[in-house]
């Protein structure tokens, strides 16, 4: 139940690339071929384990439609990780990556870990964007890269977990100031005190200690 | 058995509270007298919680009115703002307390203190207080305040009894210090009780309870072991009997935004649970609320609200004085609609006392349609339907046998154990009907309780999600230029929120009735904490919803400004100054 860290993620990218499906696959291990258009933002959460530590991923799945862009931008702030998704069967979604990336960099903290995801890898016959192109783009912009399939669940876990690993490493290296919540990282509740089971009279002190 | 859907404040006649309520009403005296001194201190301070709103109004050097508008928002954010003033107010009220404390000492007689004040006049004064300072939450007081009081008294009665007897015995030894210190100790206990019972009204009490508690603590630790022991024990009892206790306590200390506070409360609870061996299953509203993504939606709504507020201020400061006055007038008009809400709510409540089940849904759909935005209430409706369904399942078959079976099927609960129990019981139900029904009713009671809290958390989370979606769609629709005028939307949203709150109140009432029905063979000590907890979470729920509603105000205001600009400069849409 309790976690050592909580990471806030955002999922961004053009409409219809499979952002919500990736989330559903990751949180519920399900695939829904037909998905409602996301309005604004939807949420998902899952616990993962890295280096023996429980980490809770709180995922903000944003609407991809252009008309929601101004709203979803508001949600970027305070994210520790971002999944930037395109559809390997639609080149235009790949072409828009630069805009998405600029947007993300501009509206979030500079240390945010960004994972580039080429989704729908199961549709090999309809592929329009080569894997190498994705890799090149990622290399050029300092992103991690993976091709996934929300339908077959291929690489979905890995995409989320590898992002978390990268964030975790950054924490270890001291790149992230974990006490600054604007970085999208929160320390779990078990750190401050262990005497939370004491009766109410301790409540005040304990709560005070928690915020330090 | 009481009928379904009776409002929560209508206290059940079979409940043994009323006697004790009167008997112990004197115990309430201290919170009430003190609470009157506290809020004034608290109110005089700027509410740090409203940083975004009030800070911006100052920071951007905007004339008074928007600032005033920001300030008038605070009443509805009582939990937030009051909590935040708590820490600061502590020192100030400390003085007040010592003076009243010395006053008690002068009196010298416990009995005198006890009899000097009756609950009623104080309560009404207190309500007046509320009316003035928290005008927008008036309705919440009217409706919920009454059961809050009974809750308080019932909880106090448990404490009060044991304490009085101990006090009599210890009386000789303590003699001189008894009056002052004894009062302190009791105040402390009552305060903790109070925090549970009147958490919805924290605004008034929070500031004082800390002071009292701290003072109480220091006096006790000053050397009176006996009283310390009593105090501790009572605290433990209180903490054990109410799972919401710690959460509420934590909430009192916090200084961040509402979603922040809820989040931290939930995490503390989680941590506490993980430290405990898994024994008695208890329902934890905060955790469930988060699991239904209520916190995330609230947080996202806060982001939108804050950004909208910033844009409103930015726009206002960009205007010439005359123009600015004009716009401000319009914005205040919208704000007034948000505040007037309460009166309308009362009228409505009078008209349709008994809200039918289907009504909520149609009202909700209708209102959302009226907003001219494409939000459907599917999720919220599903949540409330499942809540009503399990209640009617439990209610229909009155025999505990069937109750046992039915509650096992209800959604949301992780109550694995009572499955076996139900089976075992069915086999021998012919023989020892009585014994088995008593033993199962423990599980059934727990199950009903867990489902109650779970359903409240779910419906509340979904309501807040709905309001969040509305905010997103209003901001979205702004660009489409086809929506209703903001003031019309304000009216509709007001009614929408009322409908949600009413539904939650109705559910909480239903749940407590169901608990009574199922637990009729259980002792009051066992039953009442559960009922109290459900009613408390019910009132917390309406508070959360109303807070979320207030977050919509800046969203509507910026939407209004944008649409005005569109009409005024219809041919130059490029003049949008905002990023939105």
Image: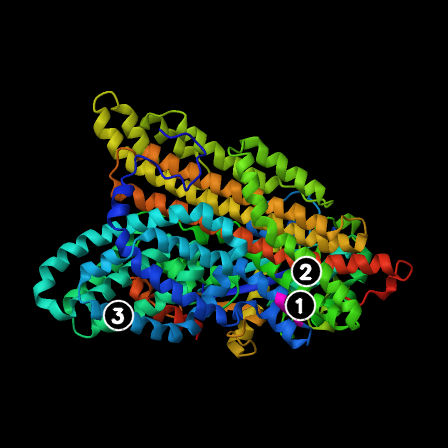
Residue B505 against residue B257 in the figure, above or below? above
The magenta segment: B64-68
Which numbered mark, 2 or 3, is in the foreground of this view?
3
Q: Mark 3: which secondary structure? A: helix
Q: Which mark is residue B65?
A: 1
Q: Disc 3 designates what residue?
A: B103
Badge 1, how many Cα within 10 Å: few under 14, some, many 20+?
A: some
Among numbered discs 1 and 3, the one appearing first in the sequence: 1
Observer-nearest of A9 and B433:
B433
In the image shown, does A5 or B26 lie closer to the viewer? B26
Residue at the spot x=68%, y=63% of the render? B308
Image position of A167 (left or right of A134): left
In this rendering, position of residue B361 left or right of residue B210 = right
* First reached walking from the N terminus: tag 2 or tag 3: 3
Query: Magenta segment, principal secondary structure?
Result: helix
Q: Report the chain holding disc 3.
A: B
- The reply to whether residue A71 is in sight is no
Instruction: Name the residue: 37% across, 41% down.
Output: B449
- Quadrant assignment for the C terminus of chain A: bottom left
Q: Say whether residue B66 is magenta.
A: yes
* Residues at marks 2 and 1, CA–CA distance in whole angstroms: 8 Å
Q: Which mark is residue B332?
A: 2
Q: Is residue B204 above or below residue B96?
A: above
Label 2 packing within 10 angstroms: few (<14), some (14-19), many (20+): some
Query: Is residue B435 within the magenta segment?
Result: no
Judge whether residue A8 can be spotted in this image: yes
Q: Are marks 2 and 3 in contact (CB under 8 Å)?
A: no
Tell me the distance, in whole angstroms, between the alpha carbons under discs 2 and 3.
Answer: 45 Å
Identity of the residue drawn at 51% across and 76% down? A172
Q: Residue furthest bottom?
A: A174
């Amino acid at each position: 139940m309790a976690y050592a860290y909580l990471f806030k993620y955002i999922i961004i990218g053009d409409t219809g690339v499979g952002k919500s499906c990736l989330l559903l696959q990751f949180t519920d291990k399900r695939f829904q071929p037909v998905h409602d258009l996301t309005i604004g933002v939807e949420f998902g959460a899952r616990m993962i384990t890295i280096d023996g530590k429980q980490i809770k991923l709180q995922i903000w799945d944003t609407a991809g439609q252009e008309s929601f862009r101004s709203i979803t931008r508001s949600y970027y702030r305070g994210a520790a990780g971002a999944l930037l998704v395109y559809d390997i069967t639609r080149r235009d979604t790949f072409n828009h990556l630069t805009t998405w990336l600029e947007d993300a960099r501009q509206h979030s903290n500079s240390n945010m870990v960004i994972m580039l995801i080429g989704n729908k890898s199961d549709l090999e016959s309809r592929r329009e964007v080569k894997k190498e192109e994705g890799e090149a783009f990622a290399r050029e912009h300092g992103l991690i890269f993976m091709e996934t399939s929300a339908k077959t669940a291929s690489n979905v876990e890995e995409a989320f977990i590898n992002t978390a690993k990268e964030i975790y490493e950054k924490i270890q290296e001291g790149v992230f100031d974990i006490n600054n919540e604007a970085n999208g990282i929160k320390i779990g509740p078990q750190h401050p005190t262990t005497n939370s089971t004491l009766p109410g009279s301790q409540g005040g002190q304990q709560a005070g200690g928690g915020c330090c | 058995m009481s009928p379904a859907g009776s409002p929560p404040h209508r206290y059940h006649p079979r409940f043994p509270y009323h006697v004790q309520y009167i008997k112990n009403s004197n115990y309430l005296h201290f919170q009430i007298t003190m609470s009157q001194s506290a809020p004034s201190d608290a109110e005089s301070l700027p509410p740090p919680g409203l940083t975004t709103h009030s800070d911006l109004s100052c920071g951007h050097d905007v004339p008074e009115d928007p600032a005033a508008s920001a300030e008038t928002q605070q009443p509805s954010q009582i939990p937030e703002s009051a909590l935040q003033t708590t820490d600061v107010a502590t020192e100030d009220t400390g003085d007040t307390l010592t003076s009243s404390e010395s006053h008690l000492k002068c009196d010298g007689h416990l009995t005198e203190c006890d009899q000097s004040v009756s609950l009623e006049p104080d309560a009404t004064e207190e309500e007046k207080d509320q009316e003035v300072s928290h005008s927008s939450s008036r309705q919440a007081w009217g409706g919920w305040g009454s059961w809050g009081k009974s809750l308080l008294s019932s909880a106090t009665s448990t404490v009060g009894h044991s304490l009085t007897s101990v006090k009599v015995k210890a009386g000789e030894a303590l003699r001189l210090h008894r009056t002052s210190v004894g009062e302190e100790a009791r105040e402390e206990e009552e305060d903790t009780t109070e925090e549970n019972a009147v958490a919805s009204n924290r605004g008034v009490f929070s500031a004082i309870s800390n002071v009292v508690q701290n003072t109480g603590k220091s006096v006790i630790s000053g050397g009176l072991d006996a009283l310390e022991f009593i105090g501790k024990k009572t605290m433990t009892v209180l903490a054990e009997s109410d799972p919401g206790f710690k959460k509420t306590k934590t909430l009192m200390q916090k200084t961040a935004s509402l979603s922040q506070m809820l989040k931290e409360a939930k995490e503390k609870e989680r941590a506490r649970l993980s430290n405990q061996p898994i024994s008695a299953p208890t329902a934890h509203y905060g955790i469930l609320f988060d699991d239904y993504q209520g916190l995330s939606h609230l947080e996202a709504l806060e982001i939108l609200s804050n950004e909208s507020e910033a844009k409103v201020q930015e726009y206002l400061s960009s205007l010439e004085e005359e123009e600015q006055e004009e716009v401000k007038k319009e914005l205040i008009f919208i704000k007034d609609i948000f505040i007037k809400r309460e009166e309308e709510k009362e009228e409505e409540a009078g008209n349709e006392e008994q809200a039918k089940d289907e009504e909520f849904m149609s009202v909700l759909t209708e209102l959302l349609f009226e907003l001219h935005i494409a939000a459907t209430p599917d999720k919220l409706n599903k949540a409330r339907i499942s809540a009503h369904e399990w209640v009617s399942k439990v209610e229909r078959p009155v025999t505990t046998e069937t109750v046992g079976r039915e509650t096992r099927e209800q959604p949301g609960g992780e109550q694995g154990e009572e499955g076996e129990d139900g089976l075992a019981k069915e086999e021998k139900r012919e023989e020892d009907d009585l014994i088995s029904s008593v033993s199962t009713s423990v599980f059934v009671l727990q199950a009903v309780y867990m489902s109650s809290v779970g359903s409240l958390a779910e419906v509340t989370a979904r309501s807040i999600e709905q309001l969040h979606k509305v905010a997103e769609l209003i901001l979205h629709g702004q660009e489409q230029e086809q929506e209703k005028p903001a003031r019309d939307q304000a009216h509709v949203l007001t009614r929408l929120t009322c409908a949600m709150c009413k539904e939650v109140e109705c559910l909480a009432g239903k749940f407590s009735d169901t608990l009574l029905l199922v637990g009729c063979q259980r002792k009051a000590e066992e039953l009442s904490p559960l009922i109290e907890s459900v009613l408390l979470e019910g009132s917390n729920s309406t508070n959360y919803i109303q807070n979320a509603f207030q977050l919509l105000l800046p969203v509507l205001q910026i939407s209004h400004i944008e649409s005005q600009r569109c009409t005024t400069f219809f041919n130059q849409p490029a003049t949008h100054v905002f990023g939105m």
